[in-house]
Amino acid sequence: MSTVQEADTSGVQDTAGGRTPVLQGKGMVKTFGRVIGLDGVDLEVYPGEVLAIIGDNGAGKSTLIKCLSGAYALDAGQISLDGHPVTFKKPQEARDAGIETVYQTLAIIPALDIASNLYLAREERRPGPLGSVLRMLDKKGMRDRASSAVQGLGIQTIQNMGQTVETLSGGQRQAVAVARAAAFGSKVVILDEPTAALGVKEGNAVLDMIKRLRDKGLPVILISHNMPHVWEVADRIHIQRLARRAAVITPQSHTMNDGVAIMTGAMTVEGNDATKEAV
Ligand SMILES: Nc1ncnc2c1ncn2[C@@H]1O[C@H](COP(=O)(O)OP(=O)(O)OP(=O)(O)O)[C@@H](O)[C@H]1O
Ligand SMILES: [Mg+2]
């Protein structure tokens, strides 16, 4: 289980308009030998917002979300969930706490079917003694619910939930991973490049899903290189550059060109701090 220290919330309440971030990282440092992945990065995501993370290749975006989701341990810094310090020793602990992550390298098992992938590590048993005593899996129930999760995402091209994931197209696989996160995330959904392998229609379906999650009050962290997508759905944009947070902007405060200029270092934003704009 995750380590939640109930007593000590000192210094973790960085509020915007009196609100506590659902998920917050402070002073996060992660090194890989001599390579610095994160160099004292702060991040906060508030209820019902889409926080985009943009940045060049190698800027530390995936490292950042891997630290937030328990895949990597921080060398220094602190992560808080609902204002309480947490330490996730593995991704399953973060999932148990309600943080669902779709990694850039998808964590799906190709040889299993779609329904089994959706219910990976959270299989449901049949009701009554068949499930509780004989431990029989509720395969039909899982298949039906998997089907509605994938349909809900607007991905109509997957016809058979019993199809193994290895037989799906790359985009369909990505859709399955996103559907899984959307179906089970209860605190935060983190998506690392969810639309990279998707066609226009499927990419738009994922954007619609992100908006629906936000409208339900669930915050989404979206890493993307697709600037039009980011400017369409993001409430705030965290710009990662050379292992640091270069700025936090909004689609209203800055243009896409500004965002790219900050990403590449062509524009600097002195004292920028849009962390307080999330109201
Ligand atoms: N497991 C690892 N071992 C060694 N170095 C790593 C490891 N993971 C990341 N790095 C390094 O940390 C830096 C940040 O990598 P990261 O994957 O976070 O970048 P990114 O912003 O996600 O890039 P991209 O846009 O290409 O996905 C890079 O220099 C990378 O080589
Ligand atoms: Mg990455």
Image (spheres, rainbow, N blue to C red):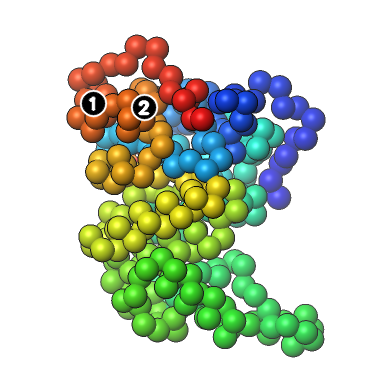
Q: Amino acid at mark 1?
A: Asp
- Residue topped by disc 2: 249
Q: Is residue 100 above or below residue 135?
A: above
Secondary element at image label 1: helix
Q: Is residue 127 above or below residue 118?
A: below
Outermost residue, top side: 270
Query: Is 51 situated left or right of 260 in this image?
Result: right
Q: CA distance from mark 2 to mark 1?
A: 10 Å
Circle 2: is it few (<14), some (14-19), or many (20+) Cα within 10 Å? Answer: many
Number of numbered discs overlaid on the protein picture: 2
Q: Is residue 154 above or below residue 216?
A: below
Residue 22 image offset from top left, x and y in percent = 59, 38
Residue at image position (37%, 65%) is 175
Residue 34: tell me if it is visible.
Answer: no
Residue at image position (52%, 81%) is 143
Residue 11 image offset from top left, x and y in percent = 66, 21
Residue 48: tell me if it is visible.
Answer: yes
Viewer-nearest residue: 157 or 95: 157
Q: Amino acid at mark 2?
A: Ile
Residue at image position (56%, 40%) is 47
Viewer-nearest residue: 129 or 19: 19
- Residue topped by disc 1: 258
CB-based contact (under 8 Å), mark 2 and mark 1: yes
Secondary element at image label 2: strand
Query: Is 151 situated left or right of 26 in this image?
Result: left
Residue 98 image offset from top left, x and y in percent = 61, 51
| Disc ID at residue 90 | none
Circle 1: is it few (<14), some (14-19), or many (20+) Cα within 10 Å? Answer: some
The yes-or-no answer for disc 1 within 8 Å of ligand 1 is no
Along the polypeptide, which appears first: circle 2 or circle 1? 2
